[in-house]
Image (cartoon, helix red, strand yellow):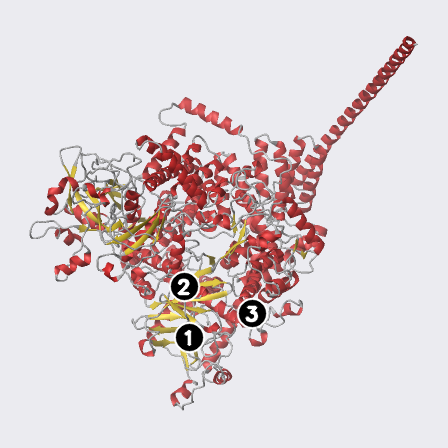
Amino acid sequence: MTNQEAASDEQFVVVEANSQDATKQEPSKPNDTDNTDQSAANGAATTTAIEIPPEIFLKGLTILSPRQTKSSKDHHSPPHESSNVAATLAVPLPPLRPEEPVASLRSAISEVIGFAHLTKYRLVLEEITTTTSSSSTTTTAGGGTNKKNSKNKNNNGASTTKKNSNGGGGSSSSTSQHGEHKEWEADNVVSTYTLDGAELATDKLVQSLKLGRAPEVVIGQEAVAAVGDANGEEKELELDDYGDLSILLDVLEKKGKVGDPVDNKIIIDASNFAIRVVLERYDVASIRDHMVRVRQLFEGNAPHLVTLKGEEDVKEEKKDQIAKKDEGDNGGDDKEKGTNGEESKGKAKQIELPNYPSDYDLSFGEQIKSGDLSTFFYLACGDEQSVIGGKGNNVGRKNGAGSKSTDDSWMDNNNNGKENKKSKTNKKKSKGNKNKSDGGAAVSNGASGAGVMKGNPSFVEAERSLYELNEATCIQCTVRHSGYHPPPANRRTLGDLAYIECTLPGGSTVHITAFPRGFYVNRSTSSSFNPAPAKEACYSQTLLDCLLQRSKPLREAWLIALTASKNRADLIRETSMAEDSITSLLRSAVSLFPNNNSGTAIGGPMTPAPSTFTPRIDSVVQTPSWLVPLPSTNEGTWEHGKMHGSNANRTEEDLMSTFGVEMKLGGMRDWNEEIQAAREMPTDTLQERLERAKFIHKIMSEFGDAALLGVKAIFDGFITPMNTHEPSRSHVYLHNNIFFSRAIDIGMDTFKTYKGDNAARKSASRDATNINLLHRLDMPGLHTLGMVLVEYMGVRFVCQSVIPGILHGEKSHTLAYGTIDARNPLKRDDEIHELAEELFGEICMVATRSVPTTPLTDERMEALKNSQVYPIQEEKKDDQTEEAGKKTVEICGPIEMKAILGSDKRKYLLDCTRLTPRDANWIGKESGGTGLLEADGKKHKTIPSSLDDDDWVTSVLRPELVANYAEMKVGEHRSKIIKEDEDLLKGESAATDDEPSTNDESESKAKRLADKIEKAEKEYMKTLKYNVNVFLPDMRPIQDLSKDAHEQLKKDEEEVRSIARYLWEIVLPKLTTAIRIGEEHGLTIPVEGGSLTDFIHQNGVNCRYLGRLAELAAEEETKDVADEKGAAKLPRQRMPLCWLELLECEMVARAAKHVLNSYMIEEGVPSAKLVASFLSAVVSTDEESASETELRMGKLHHSQVTLSDDDTNALVMSFDGVADPADERGRLEIWSDIEREVGRRFRYTLSFYGNAKSNESRARALYLPLLRRICQRSGIRLVGKRYDLGGKCLIGGSGRLTASYPIAPTDIVDILPLVKHGASVAGESFVPCSFNGGLGSVSLHILLNDVKMIYDAAHTRLSQGVELPIALEYLNETAALCQRVVETTFHPQIQKCFKLTATAYANSNDLDLALVAAEKCLTVSVALNGFDSSEAYNAHVAMADIYFSQGKIVEGMKHYRAVMFLGEAMAGPNYSLAALYFSVGRQYVEAGGHEDALRFYEVASKKRNQDRVIDGIIGRHYALALARLERFKEAFDCEKNTFNLYSAHYGEGHDRTKESAKYMNHFMTLAVQHGRLQQQKDKDNAKSSAADAIANQLLAAEDARTANKNNKANKRRTK
């Protein structure tokens, strides 16, 4: 059996079993193209398990250094080295899958010492033949080297016995089969195998042209058989850079090496094979790529690996450490284990819980209310003790970014400082001997930062060491094109490709000539041009080795960088092993040192150390955080100039930017062809489906990045519009084969159903959402374009791939469905119509209906003719056109949808803006709507009286609502059939009373009834399809064209009104009731605006109903107040106050975004001043007076924690007398615009926000959550410092940067674009991204049905509580498949797998494994969504619960405190957190910390709980805690409240009420007794005090008499 047969059909095999319920347990695979699997899944055979094919691993592979042709000559050797034969380096590889891409091998090589600087090479497979000598091996290329080089076998072999002082890249060795490495030396950093002895392969093009004919293409076994040629010489087996290692399987099978499956794995020994690096010649493009690579190495990316097995070693070390710490290992006896267990229990009881100062606010209320965000991330991670202790970045100080740090040494390390420091170090080193000891000293000097890490380092020490090591890896060496570049014609004919100018450490400049074989030093200077080789040319195939030979200071600096890089890797590994994952993320995000990390971008390629300011948090969080913690400075504020250094490399890269156009791939990419070709890839086996999903994900991700860069180029003015003759607002652009257009109303000529720019923006968003749905359905036949929406500075761009032929005239493409021009009739292609009915009709429940062929009304057509925007065409009499206006055509889908047959003969679907009917609640009653919303407009001034708004034309019902309504109708139909059949059965049984039926007859009747019901349901489901073209404006009436169609339209409109009423009358009240009693049924209230939106969407409610939900919530609160005042019996549940607060906060945030967008459009350019003024107005209650401003500024100047006004305004050029819109708007105007927008969008009047609100209502306003949501939804990033939220503001009127308060323009870090991808996981939301790339990449949907199938199978088993091991295996396989597609663990689907795995282990009481999975879930949640996300909140809750179950109270407390802070910060003080405070208080009681327990109970008692009974339980424990501290009177008062609550809810006769009365009496008795004792004690103290006073008086009188006698005696003596 071959290896490929062992993993044979790599699809999931369905195994038969005897279980009758298996088909219900195992979900069928949706939309799978594998007919075998589909038939097996849906067949009559039952299924219980999915057999996962074994994975194949290749073990023992190594990577060998480049080949050599001859020994280096003395005159070509570096001046400090002797002539020696280059040694062969061997880098061991970990076990690899055959499908491992060759590109990933090249990426891994880039981190290995001796290989990192290689860029122009190919990889060749070699077979290693081991000789009898243990110290040497020989190799044969591809099998071996060719016979021409057989004489130089010692030079080309896999090992040499001769020691080489010039080991490659700092590693010389006598390599064995696995390549042992020795430590590098100070003068041993040049890779000798890149010098003049290096063998360079012939160019592939030259080889093919030299052949004189087309080469034979052979693959698989044929390629292996073709290795030998007719002359017996062996050819190279080259690895394709775009392929994988699967070809090696064929080679191994030919050699007879086949592994056996063990634990679902096949391990194949491939140690006799190696992958050889073969150097190639350069061209101009590869020279540029090589320069970029050398820059990356100099800017902090020095390699540190000598083997690629490091990850396994780290895992083994962790396992060993865990095993050593485990007290119950195999060597101990039972008695010792029992003793240790008892000791551990005793220690657990003696654990000291965290202590809090008496003045510390446990509820975080004051900190959140005051807007102190300096410690936000510490508290969000539960690192509260650092805040209390005052450690870390600005922790515990009043002004976060404005606090002075205890260590600002990083500020001295500017460019000049670095250069001077390096030069001084070099001078000191030059005085010593040039031996090994000096090299060691140099290494220790360069990487001394690692020394502080011995022992258990603190938070700050670890970051200080990491910062110093990062600085040591950065080399002050500039590599750029010379002023003499490009070469003149005469030098190009001599082979010159480029001229490079390098500024070396110490300030010297050297000029380099690049030619096809590599690099050498030429004789040019800054004033003269002479590209000839210098006397010491220092030739090498790589630029780095050329420079290393030339400059000793560079060699010393490179050696320091290598050592520092290794120490940095060790430091990161040690700290990661000593810290939990969340602490590591926190440390990297909030370090007091600036970001000088390299190669740490999440999910991106290797990146150099930034030469400009980049937030530290961006290296650990994929989605840009709205709040940015900044390093401290000496002046107390962050300064832009301190973090932005001069960098010629950065300047050159910016000038060379092509804005997404990849020149290597031939310039502009044909995105559409790539997308469609990827979708058409085969899907017969799992491997094929996996490759297809991986390819689609890669292309879609690159398309999104290219679209984002294209929008940036348009904003920067680099792209010329295609239609320059039209108005600017109508400009469209074509860049990189992506079509860019603004989402605006472009006029009447294009057929559409909406008017206005706002409706156009919403229509584009709906289109992207539906494109996302079609992408997920993955139905063959109909094709969709790649689509991305980018919103920036209030403008929304639509970015689409281009339909083939659409730009080349009408003859290149054909309109097959719908219409583009409003003047033309609708077209319908029968084949496309069938596909649409299959896609929309069967899956989306869209009805096929007749519509007029000419759909627009005569009035609209007349207005179109009279339009001045487009020329009026001459009318031509056409009988067919006139007849077409009276005919109808059947369509399935929105009437504005189009299908175009491209020049590639594919059918493309466009403008799919509506898959559900229009919402009848948002249509006026006169226009056919329900009229339920029109009454609100008569009550409030801010609410429009009419629903006649262009925006509501695009307002449709949610698909979840339509699906729920259909399920309700099916249930009613089922009940009706059952009732009719029951009546029929009763009649039959009454007629046959004398003849009793047998069991068989009863079973037969039941079976017939079940079959009848099932058949009736299927038939009824076919009728539940809805017309999506109802209530459209300007549509031609159909009653004159078809009476049947008119009657059907009336029925459709009534059905849509029924759905709208169902939403208003049932869904919304039911949702409000669920929130009220949700805690009783396990429903968790959303914790922030994003989760709130997802929650109501899942229930089929659009966000425009937030106002109605708020009205229902306010009514429920009014009922609660009335019940508490005079109800005979209080209900147990009451409406949580946080629900209304969250609803209003979300409404204000959404309205504020639209208002800010309108301001930005008016401004035209990014304006920090505008944004700061707007935010200051939103988070304030009033404006400052002049005296208040003067007083505040005086306090700020006195504290000296901020820059002065003059220094701040000196940051930019200001012009007197120039009007600025930001200066003209005050708080009153801004809030008036927001209130008006809330009234229009949500038909609601704000209660807590806005102008003219009472202090009582303003007290419930959530200013921090509101600021957070506005920043998230608008792409604004703020400095993490203290802001005076909820106070008075200062905005506008002065024209100065300091004119806004509490948020100043200098507090705005960045304004990011928002992206909505047509293939994203979050299909309906915009995600902030960065124009710089790599940050904020959207998580895309994994188009692999196997993932959903296996995950659903695992979820089904876990929900049923059966086959836990199989379910866990499925979850692991799901995560592995996802990771193989996206090539990273940071994906929402993987996060879901970790979450479900943790839940499964926790339910089975395997808490250790549950904790591991929960920690992974928390890490991925933070990396994907940020520290303050609902996902991170839920992950913290899971971690705390698991820790508490394990008895690890201290660790659990950390996560519980994070949950408490996040709940307060994202949802406000009224969020339901009382149970958490109560739970923590009980832990303090058990630990004996009654004072701290009392404080937590006090916070819990002040929280308004949703469940009144829980209030009673908290009150009881609070009273007991008071009693333990002998505060009996307070305990009595507390218990009295509990008694009153139980009496009002249960009645006085209930057991809980009676028990409370007993406690109350007991506390009363204790209070009386304690009072009596206190009174007696006071009396005794009073008596004692009186006696002491009398005694003191007597003593004073005696002292007075004695003094008097002494005075008299003295007088007598004097006389």
Q: Which residue is mark 1?
A: 723
| Sooner in the amino-acid sequence: mark 3 or mark 1 | 1
Q: CA distance from mark 2 to mark 1?
A: 17 Å
| Sooner in the amino-acid sequence: mark 3 or mark 2 | 2
Residue 1543 vertical placement versus 1172 (above, below): above
Q: CA distance from mark 3 to mark 2?
A: 37 Å
| Residue at x-position 60% and y-position 35% | 356
Looking at the rendering, in which quadrant would you find the C terminus? top right
Rendering coords of residue 1241 (x, y %): 57, 65
Discs 3, 1 touching: Cβ within 8 Å: no
| Residue at x-position 40% and y-position 53% | 650
Question: As rendered, which of 830 and 128 lies closer to the eye?
Answer: 128
Q: Which residue is mark 2?
A: 710
Rendering coords of residue 808 (x, y %): 33, 75
Q: Which residue is mark 3?
A: 922
| Residue at x-position 40% and y-position 87% | 881
| Sooner in the amino-acid sequence: mark 2 or mark 1 | 2
